[in-house]
Image (cartoon, grey):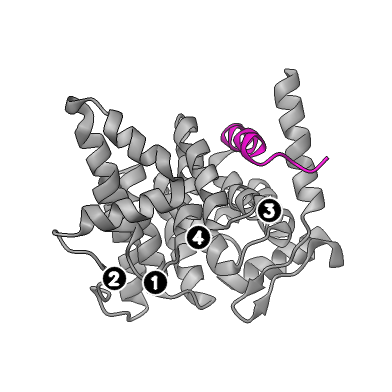
Amino acid sequence: MNPCCRKNLARLGAFYLGVIMAGQMLGTSVIPAQDSTRERVSDENYAALFGTDTMEEAKNDPELANTMKRFIYGEIVPDINLTVEQRQLVTIVVLAAIQNEKFLKKNVAASLRVGVNPLAVREALYQVAPYIGFARVFDALDTANEVFEEQGIELPLPSQGTVTEENRMEKGLEVQVGIFGDPITKMRESAPADERFVQDGLTGCCFGDTYTRGTLDLKTRELLTMSVLAALGGAEPQLKGHIIGNISVGNDRKTILSAIAAALPYIGFPRTLNAVRLVDEVTPPAQ
């Protein structure tokens, strides 16, 4: 293993060992890992979301299912600095990004089980459409809407849009500059004429049509954007920009790393290590 990977693995390990903060589960406490065995902690945290039935994956592959369950719900979940709603929304958008319908459906149902508002689930998916593409999000919405209908939730859900055709660019630029500052203005001014569509799309669609919507606050929206950029891989410049954006809107290093930790089981260690390296560049660990 090269020194860079070894260094990043050490930092990631230190993060898991050092950040022991039990999130609040909309009225149900997350069980801290240090209070009992990893097996009991994972069983209780898993049951809070999915019930006590045996994992479907354990029927044919009990060893891997057990490894996954203990790792996610016995190690990661107790140690991250997110509310259960935040953690579930990060999980949902990451699963949409990697196009895993099976686990997406389970986690949408689990989110409703612990009291996450269906509007929050939908808005999380709307939020990431400009980053992972509308086609992937509509596939994810088909899955989420199937769960909503099974739960007797009337569709379509209420509109959350706040802009018009006349002011979407203006409102989008307000949000964009509010997060990223003067470089946005300079970037728009310096864009070649034949590339202007990209800048107008960022301002109008990403920020005007999307960031201005209701239900989710700006900090949550920026956290979700960063999470899917980490999940996609190959978007490191944009990922670094949105790590900076997270700091700008008030998400601290622990919150940012917690979102990356929540994504880890679904995106794997290589993309996680790339994301952690960028976090360290933006907001270095305490010495």
Secondary structure beneath label 2:
loop
Secondary structure beneath label 4:
helix
Label at residue 219: 4
Q: Magenta span covers which residues?
A: 269-287
Look at the image and tell me in which quarter the N terminus lies. Answer: top right
Residue denoted by label 1: 215
Of the image marks 2 and 3, the number of the one nearer the N terminus: 2
Q: What residue type is labelled 2?
A: Gln
Residue denoted by label 3: 254
User: Disc 2, disc 3: CB below 8 Å?
Assistant: no
Query: Residue 285's spot in the image, x, y percent?
Result: 75, 41
Q: Give the spatial CA distance, label 1 vs label 2.
A: 7 Å
Label at residue 244: none
Look at the image and tell me in which quarter the C terminus lies. Answer: top right
Q: What residue type is labelled 1?
A: Thr
Q: Residues within 10 Å of mark 2 (few under 14, many from 20)?
A: some
